[in-house]
């Protein structure tokens, strides 16, 4: 039996404990930048294992360090632990106890998984040729996020490579998804205000109709991706909010538009910003209106390093078998794990966690989101395998 096979058996033995941790965190969610009890829980657990712990990293982050029995490289493993401002609508015993807050993205499972990995690696640290840094990150869900301040605080000091994973309800349990190169998109948002001249609905000729102009902007935005960008460059421009007016017979003074842009290439990102401004300016100045256009760049794209991505795929093959290792298309969702990959080689992968038999069919950020808890075993085993493969490679 191989070394990692023995460790996989230990992970299996910790399954009930992983479930208990995950459900405790699920019942007691904390929002981004408001995490207090969650980092305490993580730090106490790691301390009891004998892991060297640093708290308050970058704000609310927790770092654990495991020192191997033999000298070598240092690999970092990251899990996030914040929740979302969503009311939990699941009918389960571990439903969130906090009104309007829930773990609707699997971060509770990420934390439970990495704590189990920590327990196994710390117990068997003499087998490690090198060291492991455990990065428990706060505030992934809300930009500017927790990754960058943790990096600025030194969480990657001495680290040679970094790996992370996401439990993914849109991939069936038993599968592992990976991608060389772009994996998740840059996630930006925008806010536009068009200022016209309001007036009576019966006298539109005496107004500068901000609502009408805003509809023209939204309409012309639809041609930016379809007609202005290289069709081989993926991008999304979504208008998600439109607010104007309050009375049926009054043309409003102003209209506000908001939405998101998703890209993988910074040149495409810059082009979209320029094209949006061109559209707004043309519509407004031609009609005598004024406007403000604010574009907020969020997390950069998650771009896996080729060598480390293939290392993940090979590790996953050892865990779940080649037939269950799937090369995924890039996802338009955003993740601040991207900041880690800008600093160190590494890769981010997806652990299949969907299963209709346990109600794990809802997308992430849905009020009824859940995942197959057995996926935590797969995720832990891949993290352990990739750790040994990297350190011994």
Image (tube, rainbow, N blue to C red):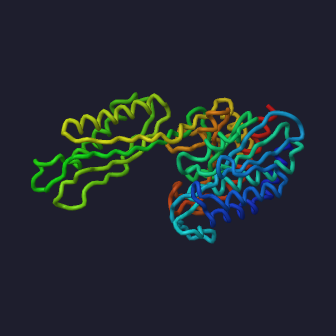
Which residue: 63% across, 65% down?
28
Q: Quadrant of residue 306?
A: top right
Residue beneath the point at 60% across and 61% down: 30
Whole-percent x, y for residue 87 in the image: 51, 65
* The N terminus sits in image quarter: top right
Q: Determine whether 45 is above or below 337 in the image.
A: below
Image x and y of residue 192, in percent: 34, 44
Provide residue 354's location: percent of width, then percent of height. 59, 55
Judge whether 228 appears above or below 100 on screen.
above
Tell me, yes or no, if residue 207 can be seen here. yes
Determine the residue positioned at 50% across, 42% down. 298
Q: Nearer the viewer, residue 172 or 44?
A: 44
- Residue 220, by quadrant, is top left
The quarter of the image holding the C terminus is: top right
Lateral position of residue 181 relative to residue 39, left or right: left
Say whether residue 323 is visible.
no
User: What residue sits 18% from the left and 54% below the top?
Assistant: 251
């Amino acid at each position: 039996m191989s070394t990692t096979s023995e460790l996989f058996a230990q992970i299996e033995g910790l399954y009930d404990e992983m479930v208990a941790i995950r459900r405790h965190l699920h019942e007691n969610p904390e929002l981004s930048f408001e995490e207090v009890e969650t980092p305490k829980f993580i730090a106490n657990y790691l301390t009891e294992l004998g892991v060297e712990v640093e708290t308050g990293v970058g704000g609310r982050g927790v770092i654990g360090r495991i020192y191997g029995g033999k000298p070598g490289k240092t690999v970092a493993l990251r899990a996030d632990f914040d929740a979302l401002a969503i009311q939990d609508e699941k009918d389960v015993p571990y439903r969130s106890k906090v009104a309007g807050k829930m773990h609707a993205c699997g971060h509770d499972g990420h934390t439970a998984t990495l704590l189990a990995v920590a327990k196994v690696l710390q117990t068997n640290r003499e087998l490690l040729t090198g060291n492991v840094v455990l990065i428990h990150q706060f505030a992934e869900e809300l930009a500017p996020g927790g990754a960058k301040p943790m990096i600025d605080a030194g969480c990657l000091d001495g680290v040679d490579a970094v790996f992370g994973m996401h439990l993914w309800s849109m991939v069936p349990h038993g599968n592992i998804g990976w991608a060389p190169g772009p994996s998740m998109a840059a996630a930006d948002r925008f806010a536009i205000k068009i200022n016209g001249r309001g007036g009576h609905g019966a006298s539109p000729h005496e107004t500068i109709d901000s609502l009408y102009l805003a509809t023209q902007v939204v309409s012309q935005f639809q041609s930016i991706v379809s007609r202005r960008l290289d069709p081989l460059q993926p991008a999304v421009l979504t208008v998600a909010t439109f607010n104007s007016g309050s009375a049926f017979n009054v043309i409003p003074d102003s209209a506000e538009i908001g939405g998101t842009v998703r890209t993988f290439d910074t040149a495409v990102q810059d082009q979209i910003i320029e094209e949006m401004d061109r559209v707004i300016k043309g519509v407004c100045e031609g009609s005598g209106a004024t406007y403000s256009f604010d574009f907020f760049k969020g997390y950069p794209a998650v771009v896996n390093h080729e060598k480390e991505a293939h290392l993940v795929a090979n590790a996953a093959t050892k865990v779940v078998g080649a037939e269950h290792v799937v090369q995924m298309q890039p996802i338009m969702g955003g993740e601040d794990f991207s900041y880690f990959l800008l600093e160190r080689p590494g890769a981010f992968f997806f652990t299949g966690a969907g299963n209709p038999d346990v109600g794990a069919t809802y997308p992430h950020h849905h009020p009824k989101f859940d995942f197959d808890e057995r996926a935590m075993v797969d995720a832990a085993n891949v993290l352990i395998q990739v750790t040994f493969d990297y350190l011994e490679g």
